Image (cartoon, rainbow, N blue to C red):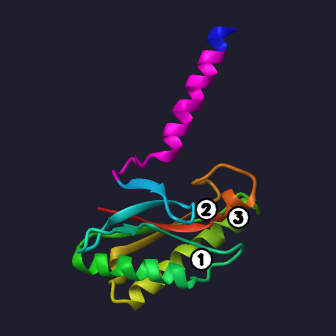
Amino acid sequence: MKKTALALVSALFLLAACDSASTNTADGAATGVDANGKVTGYIGRDSQGNNIADRVFFELASSELSSDAQATLSRQADYLKANSMNVTLEGQCDERGTREYNIALGERRATAAKNFLVSLGIPANRISTISYGKERPAVVGHDDAAWSQNRRAVTVSAN
C-alpha cells in the first residue's frame, strides 16, 4: 500500500514538472505554453532575441486567418526573409469530423498560411504544405480547450 501511494505521488510530481517545463521537439524546436495557454513552438528568434512562434490557430471549421495569426505569420515572414530556410506548413484539425473532411480542411489551413507568407514576399518555392487532418493532435482531449489547440497550421523547417 505504501509503495503504491509513493509511486502515485512520485508520478504526480513528475507530471507536474513536465507540464510546466519547456521541451524540445524531435527537430530541436523549443516548445512550451504561451500566455493564452496554447501549446507553441518556435521557428527561431528575431533580431531582439524574441521567439517567433511556429503555429497559428483557427476557429472551428475555418481556414480564415485571424489578426493574431496574421501577426504571427508576419513575424515568420520577417524571419524567413533574413534566413534562407525552406519550410513546410502543416495543416491540422481537431478530432471532430470525418478523416476526409479534416484532411481537406487541414490543407486549406496550410494553404491559407502559405498564401499569406507569399503575399509578404516569401518565394512560394520555399514553402510546401501538407495536411495531417486530425491525425497529430498537439493536445489530447475531448473538449474545447484541447480542440482549440489542435486547429492549427504549424511552420516547420524543411531543410
Q: Residue at x 38, y 74 (%)?
A: 127
Which one is in front, 157 or 39?
Answer: 39
Taking the magenta stretch, the answer to whether it contains residue 27 is yes
Residue linked to disc 3: 100
Instruction: State the extent of the magenta-drawn residues as a range.
Output: 5-28
**The C terminus - image quarter:** bottom left
Callout 3 amino acid = Glu
Is residue 25 toward the left or the right of residue 8 in the image? left
Q: Is residue 27 above or below residue 74?
A: above
The kind of residue tagged 1 is: Arg
Q: CA distance from mark 2 to mark 1?
A: 17 Å
What separation in Å lies between label 1 and label 3 (alpha carbons)?
13 Å
The residue identified by callout 2 is: 149
Which callout, 1 or 3, points at the residue further toward the start of the chain? 3
Tell me residue 86's x, y (percent): 31, 70
| Foreground of the two, 103 or 122 | 122
Q: Is residue 105 visible?
A: yes
Front residue of this view, candidates 20 and 125: 20
